[in-house]
Each structure stands twice: as C-alpha cells, then as structure tokens.
Image (cartoon, grey):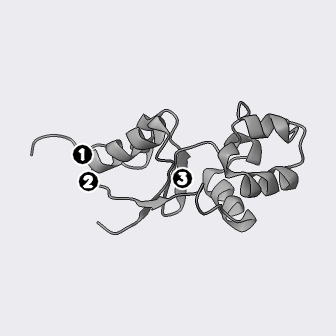
Amino acid sequence: MPADCVLWFDARCSTSRHALELLRERGVEPELRRFLEEPPTVEEIGALLRLLGAPPHALARTDADEYQALRLSERTPAEELIRALAQHPRILDRPIVVSGERAVVARPPERVGELFPLAPHGG
C-alpha cells in the first residue's frame, strides 16, 4: 500500500500510539509526521485545516499549559491561532490522520476507521 497516509504523531501520547496500532491492523503503514520534533509551518496547518474542514480552534488543545500561558481563547483571531499552533506544536490536538484529500483528528483513536474502515471478515 502506498504511503497515502500521514499520521501526525507524538510517541509520548497513548492516543497517538493507539491510532498507529489501529492503522496497522488495517494494513496501513503511515508516514509518521513527528510534529513536535519538526514543527509544522503556518502553510501546513492551513492545508490541514482545509482537509479537516475545521476552524483553527478545533485543532487547539485548550487544556495545554502553553495554550493558557499564551492567553489563547475562542476569541483569538484565526490567523493568530494558526501562528501559535505552528510556533508551539504541543498545543496541536493529536493524533491527526491524513489520507489523500481527507483528514480526521483521531480522538478517540477509533476515528481512523472513518478513513480506513476494517475490511469485512471472510470471503
């Protein structure tokens, strides 16, 4: 199967690890996007938001210490929040699975099934 799947992944996050397990159970070996080691650009986050069809606030972990320290909120303008997500990737909700022109925030991890349903057993 081609690397048609990218998993925005944090190895310390149990939800990320579970999403990876679920993808592998479906025969999908994703490219791992280790966004904490290589922070995303503003353009990458913009592209991700377009695939998700979601506003930037949908990708923010509002309980993250950095979110609070930066005084971000629902009232933070979209462009400012996108810049904050790029500069402080710990704020990004994860894991995120991207396949072709579609993406999901895999929280809970079973949401990977929206992009990669389990094949029916038998026949």
Q: Earlier in the sequence, mark 2 or mark 3?
A: 2
| Residue 80, percent from left and from top | 87, 53
Looking at the image, do the residues carrying marks 3 and 1 touch, with CB atoms under 8 Å apart?
A: no
The residue at the point 45 percent across, 36 percent down is 14
| Residue 95, percent from left and from top | 52, 45
Residue identifier under label 1:
119
Instruction: Inspect the image, locate mark 1, and give the three-letter code of the amino acid beneath it.
Output: Ala
In space, the residues marked 2 and 3 are separated at their CA atoms by: 18 Å
Q: Farthest left residue? A: 123
Are there few (<14), some (14-19), or many (20+) residues within 10 Å of tag 2? few
Q: Earlier in the sequence, mark 3 or mark 1?
A: 3
In space, the residues marked 1 and 2 are separated at their CA atoms by: 10 Å
The residue at the point 85 percent across, 36 percent down is 73
Numbered tag placed on residue 18 in the rendering? none
Residue identifier under label 2:
27
Above or below, 63 relative to 84: above
Instruction: Inspect the image, locate mark 3, and give the three-letter code of the amino acid beneath it.
Output: Ala
The secondary element bearing badge 1 is classed as loop
The residue at the point 72 percent across, 61 percent down is 46
Instruction: Inspect the image, locate mark 2, and give the three-letter code of the amino acid beneath it.
Output: Gly
Nearer mark to the viewer, of 1 and 2: 2
Are there few (<14), some (14-19), or many (20+) residues within 10 Å of tag 3? many
Looking at the image, do the residues carrying marks 1 and 2 touch, with CB atoms under 8 Å apart?
A: yes
Nearer mark to the viewer, of 3 and 1: 3
Query: On the picture, is 50 further left or further right than 108?
Result: right
In space, the residues marked 3 and 1 are separated at their CA atoms by: 20 Å
Q: Earlier in the sequence, mark 1 or mark 2?
A: 2
Are there few (<14), some (14-19), or many (20+) residues within 10 Å of tag 1? few
Residue identifier under label 3:
103
